[in-house]
Image (spheres, grey):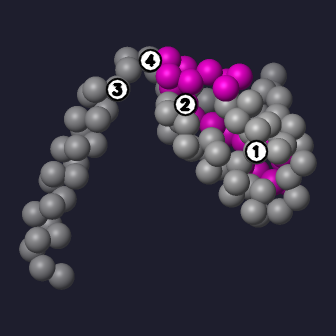
């Protein structure tokens, strides 16, 4: 491994730091959405990909056995109703928990 890899590292860190400074001052939020109709790992992958594609979503974890998605998001950028609608458009029933 050459030094070029190490020389690139600080620039990557700077880009991440700059991105975080430019982001909204809204505190990140987390929501659970109950999902019906998933049957396999492919279903899980589809729902996770569908969620993570939305601006404002920082993470999405889908639990097949529990039938739910846990989503980290910025409420100033995306609403929970929009996330539930995206899951529904992917072909699953979706209801925010709580």
Residue under the point 22% across and 52% down: 12
Q: Would you name the residue on which mark 3 appears? A: 23
Residue under the point 70% across and 54% down: 46
Residue lying farthest to the bottom in this orientation: 1
First in residue order: circle 3 vs circle 2 = 3
Front one among 47 and 91? 91
First in residue order: circle 2 vs circle 4 = 4
Q: Would you name the residue on which mark 1 appears? A: 90
Residue under the point 81% across and 22% down: 98
Crowd band around label 1 with a 10 angstrom C-alpha radius: few (<14), some (14–19), many (20+): few
Task: Check disc 4 and report its element: helix, strand or loop.
Answer: loop
The label number, if any, that marks residue 26 in the structure image: 4
Crowd band around label 3 with a 10 angstrom C-alpha radius: few (<14), some (14–19), many (20+): few
Q: Residue 34, can we see it?
A: no
The label number, if any, that marks residue 73 in the structure image: 2
In the picture shown, does residue 20 fall above or below 26? below
Residue 61 screen position, x and y as percent: 65, 48
Proximity of marks 3 and 1: CB atoms separated by less than 8 Å: no
* Mark 4–mark 1 distance (CA, rounded to whole Å): 28 Å
Instruction: Tell me the magenta residue range.
Output: 62-82
* Placement of the N terminus among the 4 image quadrants: bottom left
């Amino acid at each position: 491994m050459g030094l070029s890899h190490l020389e690139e590292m600080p620039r990557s860190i700077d880009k991440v730091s700059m991105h975080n400074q430019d982001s909204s001052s809204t505190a990140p939020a987390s929501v659970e959405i109950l999902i019906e109709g998933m049957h396999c790992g492919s279903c899980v992958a589809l729902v996770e990909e569908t969620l993570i594609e939305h601006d404002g979503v920082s993470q999405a974890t889908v639990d097949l056995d529990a039938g739910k998605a846990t989503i980290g998001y910025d409420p100033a950028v995306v609403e929970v109703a929009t996330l539930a609608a995206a899951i529904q458009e992917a072909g699953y029933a979706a209801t925010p928990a709580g």
